Structures are given as C-alpha cells and as structure tokens.
Image (cartoon, grey):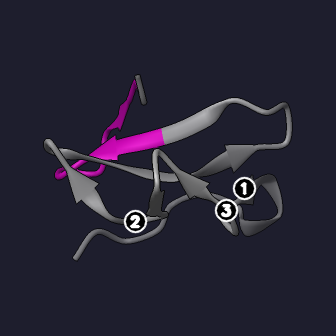
C-alpha cells in the first residue's frame, strides 16, 4: 500500500482516465487524479510522481 501524500483539496479523482478509475495500476503507474489546473497526476509503484502519458 502506498500512503496518499497529497492534499485532498487539490486533487479531483472522480472521473476516469484512459477508461480506468483513479488508483488503478497499469504498466507500472497509476493515475491518482487531476490537479486544479487540469494537469493529470500519476505515480509509480513506489509512490513517486511520474508522467501520465
């Protein structure tokens, strides 16, 4: 389990990304939500921020 280290107020994860819900790992990374500025946020299995695309 990876602890959630981000402010809930700054991340929205109510939608799907590439047809999958937030926190679902595919290809070693998971989308965890969108920042308020619209950027997508993804992490690897160690919890490090990585590019979503």
In the picture of the structure, the residue carrying the numbered disc 2 is 23
Nearer to us: label 3 or label 2: 3
Q: Residue at x 46, y 55 (%)?
A: 19
What whole-number distance in Å separates the C-alpha atoms at marks 2 and 1? 13 Å
In the picture of the structure, the residue carrying the numbered disc 1 is 11
- Residue 47, horizontal then vertical, whole percent: 29, 51
Determine whether, in the image, residue 15 is placed left or right of residue 16: right
Q: Residue at x 43, y 41 (%)?
A: 42
Nearer to us: label 2 or label 1: 2
Q: Secondary structure at mark 3?
A: loop
In the picture of the structure, the residue carrying the numbered disc 3 is 15
- 15 is higher (above) or lower (below) than 10: below
Quadrant in the rendering for residue 1: bottom left
Determine whether, in the image, residue 42 is placed left or right of residue 24: right
Furthest-front residue in this view: 19
If you read the primary sequence from the N terminus, does the residue marked by circle 2 or circle 1 appear first? 1
- Residue 30, horizontal then vertical, whole percent: 34, 51
The stretch in magenta equals 42-51
Q: Secondary structure at mark 1?
A: strand
Determine whether, in the image, residue 15 is placed left or right of residue 28: right
């Amino acid at each position: 389990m990876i602890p959630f280290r981000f402010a809930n107020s700054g991340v929205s994860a109510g939608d799907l990304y590439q047809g999958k819900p937030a926190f679902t790992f595919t290809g070693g990374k998971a989308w965890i939500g969108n920042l308020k500025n619209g950027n997508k946020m993804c992490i690897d299995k160690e919890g490090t921020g990585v590019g979503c695309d």
